Amino acid sequence: MAAEEGKVDPMHQFHIEPLLGSNAWELAGFNIAFTNSAMWMVITTIVLTVFVVGGMKRELVPGRWQMMVETFTGFIDDMLEANVGKAGRKYVPYIFSLFMFILFANLLGLLPLGIVGLHPFTFTSHFTVTGVLAIISFSIVLIVGFWKHGIKFFSLFVPHGTPLPMIPIIFPIELISFLVRPFSLALRLFVAMMAGHVLLKVLSSFVIDGTNAGPEFAALVAVPSFILMIGISALEILVAGIQAYVFALLTSLYINDAEHLH
Amino acid sequence: MPQIAQIMETYSSQIFWLLVTFGFVFFVVGRGMVPRVMETVAQRDDQIASDLAAAEAAGNQADEEEEAWRKRENENRADAQAVIAKAKADAAASSEKKLAAAQKRLDTKLAKAEVEIAEARTAALTEVESVAAEAAQDIVKQLAGVSVTAASAKSAVKKAMTNA
């Protein structure tokens, strides 16, 4: 860090580093090194598992923890009920896993662990990760759609009441908008998480550089930046929840298309 | 941007670990635990619903019992009312009978008294007549010096008395 003269690189936080060596981790010719990203996935998994296990006391009168877990399952259940209907019940495990996994990853990535020298890593800010999640969601939509409706699934691309001469135009438009869905899903989450983290890092560099440049700069730049950082941090917590919700909500809407066509 | 700069070295590791961790979350947490949590919630909802139904049934039964009690109470009251009315009627009848008996007694007494009075009156009248006849005989004897027979004096007195 001394070589960089205290400069904060806002992109450094997204850097993936192998933690336990790189070359020894190979699977069928692919490198599967245990990186800091993988570590935070494992941490997210552990925290999420502990959270849900804590709500498994199955008491008739729930405690606080059980109530919290039940609130989340009820929330996902209601969302699927509202968007997909009775058939939505069977997707609760998937949507719950998706929502909670993204939510916990986003929130854990925001933890101010830098104070104690650890570096939180938000793996949802990598499109390799969000892309895989989006592809899984999209595959479920395709599989369910073709499983339930067969070739009739293509009628999804011709809305009801489309005049016959319009079909050749509408069909490609609807098809493209359908095919764009996994990209929009993946990019939305990745961009939202990355933008927030970059903004926080840029502001923190203002705080550090402004403080180092003398009292005038500290008062004019560092202090307002710090106040702004507090606000942005609060906003980021909101965004962490909203992006997880949006991902889960859109997935359930797409599943609704697959279940019921139009 | 490390996301793009590092993609070739890291994509396989990212995808692998994501599939491992998310797979664990889906199969263990999502498939294993979430249904049981939701089952607990459903059980609780059922319990609450059945408890509410039981409470409502108990409430209904209490209402029914109250209704039955009220009916019984009304019947009892009506019975009591009937008994009272009968007692009143009996009492009224017996007192009327007594009154009638007393009235009859009084009537007979009155009738007897009237007869007695009438007898006494006739007796008195005959006495008055005889006294008046005697007096008229004396008066006529003294004033006119004529002696009248008792029978004619009597008839004259009778005539005068009926005219009076």
Image (cartoon, helix red, strand yellow):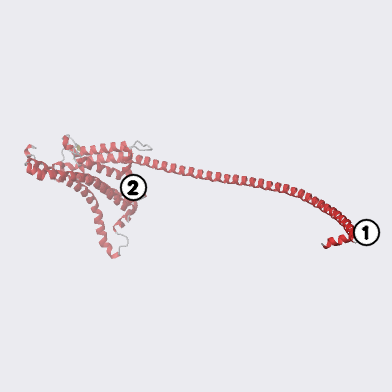
Q: Chain of mark 2?
A: A
Q: Which residue is mark 2?
A: A78
Please say if B102 is above or below B150. Answer: above
For mark 2, give the secondary structure.
helix
Badge 1 density bin: few <14, some 14–19, many ≥20, Cα 10 Å: few
Few, some or many residues within 10 Å of mark 2 (<14, 14–19, 20+): some
* Residue A78 in view (yes/no): yes
**Residue located at (46% from left, 44% from top):** B56
Is B29 or A212 nearer to us in this picture? A212
Could you tell me residue A97's position as x and y percent? 29, 43
Q: Chain of mark 1?
A: B
Mark carried by residue A261: none
Query: Is A216 left, or right, of A147 in this rendering?
Result: left
Q: Give the amino acid type for the residue marked by disc 2 in the picture.
A: Asp
Q: Is residue A207 left or right of residue A106?
A: left
Closest to the camera, between mark 2 and mark 1, is: 1
- In the picture, the quarter occupied by the C terminus of chain A is bottom left
Amino acid type at circle 1 is Thr
Q: Relative to B157, is A22 above or below?
A: above
Q: Quadrant of the N terminus of chain A?
A: top left
Discs 2, 1 touching: Cβ within 8 Å? no
Quadrant of res B133: bottom right
Percent across and percent down for residue B38 are 35, 42
- A24 with respect to A45 (left or right): left
Q: Position of residue A129 (x, y in %)?
A: 21, 44
**Residue designated by label 1:** B149
Same-chain check, marks 2 and 1: no
